[in-house]
């Protein structure tokens, strides 16, 4: 097996995967639509359309692992963008022989009343969760058929550098630093798991390298749950700012706003994540890989950056 690694996507997870692999001396190639140099020492960039299986297979030739760290830009268009992208990545893994390591999320589990373990069925009721569950099912079927070696890791809402407006906590920071009230989806006092993007990257690399870990999903080691109010206050404190008032966006505002905002419609379908405890059980990954999450104080300091 070579020590060549190909990463599709240059969002926060892709960048952390690239940096961690480069730090250990691996050959790292990042594939993006623009081919822009990421500015990470030891990491090269390739320009390609990730929906083109032939181009991806060429980029992945001789690689030990093909990492799916893609994050389609338009959150409202997943049905159009994800299926061809995932199909191309899976086909590239077939042709190249590289292990296929997927950055997943918790959407496939759907609404739950218990901590989320990997033993739970993928029982999503919203269209995004159903889509992500199907994409993993396709990769799992190819793995079970002996066509690829596939594994998926699932983290909760991201924190850490580079997450920006895509994070429920980090998107509040610009206004909160000015002392303005934070308006959040759902109940600001429900316990919720947050995951550092560097821990997602760390598990993705470890799971790809461990043949005994393939063919299943793994939940990313994450800190004990915090409420939105607590998490935002902790991040502000890490940056030297006082806490701000935190209020729930009224449900009627979300419903009315959804009439004219596709993004609010999407978020409304996932509101269940914020109206009840949303807790990740990561005990399986901790035991199998001997991994622990980044300490919470460090997560908050990294997010405050």
Image (cartoon, rainbow, N blue to C red):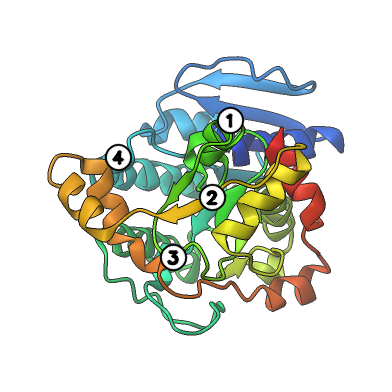
Q: Pick whichever, 112 or 37, lies toward us.
A: 112
Residues at marks 2 and 3 touching, judged by CB atoms closer than 8 Å: no
Q: Earlier in the sequence, mark 2 or mark 4?
A: 4
Q: Quick one: label 2, few (<14), some, or many (20+) residues within 10 Å?
A: few
Tell me the SS state at disc 4: helix
Instruction: Kindly report the distance in space between the C-alpha atoms of the residues bearing marks 1 and 3.
Output: 23 Å
Q: Earlier in the sequence, mark 1 or mark 4?
A: 4
Residue 284 picture quarter: bottom right
What residue is drawn where x is 58% and y is 36%? Answer: 179
The residue nearer to you, when weighing 243 against 45, is: 243
- Label 2: which residue? 245
Q: What residue did someone put label 4 on?
A: 81
Q: Does label 1 or label 3 sit earlier along the sequence?
A: 1
Q: Callout 1: few (<14), some (14-19), or many (20+) C-alpha neighbours within 10 Å?
A: few
Dot 1 or dot 2: first in sequence order is 1
Q: Which residue is mark 3?
A: 187
Residue furthest right as drawn = 24
Q: State left or right for residue 51 relative to residue 251.
A: right
Q: Quadrant of residue 43?
A: top right
Q: Which mark is residue 178?
A: 1
In the rendered image, residue 4, in percent from the top left (x then y), is placed at 72, 36
Distance of label 2 from label 4 (alpha carbons): 38 Å
In this rendering, is residue 209 above or below 159? below
Q: Residue at x 34, y 62 (%)?
A: 271
């Amino acid at each position: 097996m070579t020590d060549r690694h190909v990463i599709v996507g240059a969002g926060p997870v892709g960048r952390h995967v690239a940096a961690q692999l480069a730090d250990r001396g691996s050959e790292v190639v990042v594939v993006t639509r623009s081919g822009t140099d990421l500015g990470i020492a030891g990491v090269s960039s390739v320009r390609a359309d990730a929906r083109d299986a032939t181009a991806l297979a060429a980029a992945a030739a001789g690689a030990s692992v093909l990492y799916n760290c893609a994050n389609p830009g338009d959150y409202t268009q997943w049905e159009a963008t994800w299926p061809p992208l995932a199909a191309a990545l899976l086909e590239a893994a077939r042709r190249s022989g590289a292990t296929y390591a997927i950055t997943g999320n918790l959407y496939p589990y759907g609404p739950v009343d218990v901590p989320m373990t990997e033993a739970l069925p993928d029982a999503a009721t919203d269209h995004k969760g159903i889509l992500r569950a199907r994409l993993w099912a396709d990769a799992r079927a190819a793995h079970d058929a002996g066509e690829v070696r596939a594994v998926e890791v699932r983290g909760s809402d991201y924190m850490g550098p580079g997450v920006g407006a895509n994070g429920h906590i980090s998107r509040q920071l610009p206004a909160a630093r000015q002392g303005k009230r934070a308006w959040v989806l759902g109940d600001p006092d429900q316990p919720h798991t947050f995951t550092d993007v560097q821990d997602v990257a760390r598990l993705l690399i470890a799971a790809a390298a461990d043949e005994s870990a393939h063919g299943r999903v793994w939940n990313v080691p994450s800190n004990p749950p915090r409420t939105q109010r607590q998490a935002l206050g902790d991040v502000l404190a890490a940056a030297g700012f006082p806490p701000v008032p935190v209020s729930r966006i009224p449900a009627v505002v979300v419903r009315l706003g959804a009439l004219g905002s596709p993004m609010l419609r999407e978020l409304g379908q996932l509101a269940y994540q914020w109206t009840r405890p949303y807790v990740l059980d990561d005990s399986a990954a901790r035991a199998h890989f001997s991994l622990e999450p980044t300490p919470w104080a460090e997560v908050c300091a990294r997010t405050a950056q």
